[in-house]
Image (cartoon, rainbow, N blue to C red):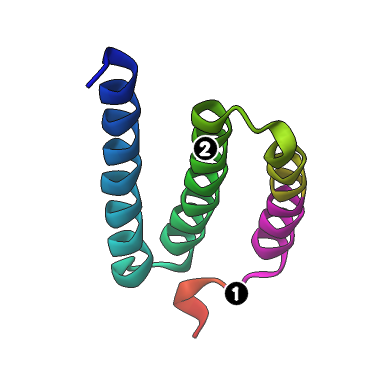
Amino acid sequence: MSTMNILWLIAGAMLLIAAVLTTIRILGGPTTLDRLVALDMAIALTMTGLALWAAISGDSTVLSAIVAIALVNFIGSIAVARFRVRDDQR
């Protein structure tokens, strides 16, 4: 196994561990802001996974998808942060 393959495996494993920890935070976050930050992290991990795939395969067609996901995520985060109800008001 070459050095680059080992590095790709390490990067993929780190992304997988981060995804599991993020999922735990989404499911068990005590406040809605914790869940919002974890959801933003999950989307960032998705974009990072796509970038890793583009680097491994040499396929640059997913780069436009990364940009689109980033823009939609930004607008969604702003909307949720603007219109969310405080946790202590429920």
Looking at the image, is 19 positioned above or below residue 14?
Answer: below
Q: Is residue 18 left or right of residue 89?
A: left
Looking at the image, is 58 positioned above or below residue 85?
Answer: above
In this view, which residue lies farthest toward the left? 1
The x and y percentages for residue 37 are: 48, 52
The x and y percentages for residue 48 are: 51, 37
* The magenta stretch spans residue 79: yes
Q: Is residue 66 left or right of residue 46?
A: right
Mark toward the viewer: 2 or 1: 2
Badge 2 marks a residue whose secondary structure is helix
Kind of residue at disc 2: Trp
Residue that mark 2 sits on: 53
> Residue placed at 65% from the left, 59% from the top?
81
- Residue 68 got which mark? none
The x and y percentages for residue 9 are: 29, 32
Who is closer to the viewer here, 2 or 36? 2
> Residue placed at 49% from the left, 85% from the top?
90
- Which contiguous range is marked in magenta? 72-85
In this view, which residue lies farthest toward the top? 3
> Residue placed at 47% from the left, 48% from the top?
41
The x and y percentages for residue 60 are: 70, 31
**Measured Cα–Cα span from mark 2 to mark 1:** 38 Å
Q: Residues within 10 Å of mark 1 (few under 14, many from 20)?
A: few
> Residue placed at 45% from the left, 75% from the top?
88
Residue that mark 1 sits on: 85
Q: Main secondary structure of the magenta part?
A: helix
Looking at the image, is 74 positioned above or below residue 57?
Answer: below
* The magenta stretch spans residue 62: no
